[in-house]
Amino acid sequence: MAVKRAYEPVAPEDGQRVLVDRLWPRGLSKEAAAIDLWLKEIAPSTTLRQWFGHDPTRWEVFQSRYRAELDANGEVVGRLRDVIRAGKTTLIYGAKDETHNDAVVLAGYLQGN
């Protein structure tokens, strides 16, 4: 499993491209994004996303709250795990910050970190 920003070029090694954001990446066409699956239900809740606002000072609390949401969202997490088991998968996100975003937390969660 890999994590990649939606605005980076599509590559064959991406495998299944799964968008894990609740909102579609701004200014990106569906063709350019080449998304195989949009799992908006696995993204942080709107309330949590708006509270976080990509503020690095809120990163630790955001991670904890998002992981709690994932714990409570077993059906969708299981669906994503099935996709990952089926072959190479890249989690796609739209945020500018490559370190502090939901896809990073999700990848860690899925890897047991």
Image: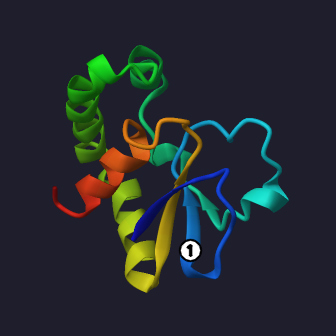
The image quadrant that residue 17 belongs to is bottom right
The image quadrant that residue 35 belongs to is bottom right
Query: What number of labels is visible?
Result: 1
Q: Position of residue 84 (x, y in %)?
A: 41, 74
Tell me if 19 is positioned left or right of 2 in this view: right
| Amino acid at the residue labelled 1 | Asp
Tell me if 31 is positioned left or right of 9 in this view: right
Q: Position of residue 28 (x, y in %)?
A: 78, 46
In terms of depth relative to the viewer, which is nearer, 72 or 101?
101
Q: Quadrant of the N terminus?
A: bottom left
Q: How is the protein colored in the picture?
A: rainbow
Tell me if 17 is positioned left or right of 43 in this view: right
Which residue appears farthest toward the left when viewing the image? Answer: 113
| Residue at position x 68%, y 41% in the image | 24
In terms of depth relative to the viewer, which is nearer, 23 or 72?
23
In terms of depth relative to the viewer, which is nearer, 78 or 44?
44
Q: Position of residue 10 (x, y in %)?
A: 68, 68
Q: Residues within 10 Å of mark 1 (few under 14, many from 20)?
A: some
Whether residue 4 is situated above or below residue 81 in the rendered picture: above
Q: Quadrant of the C terminus?
A: bottom left
> Badge 1 is on which residue?
14
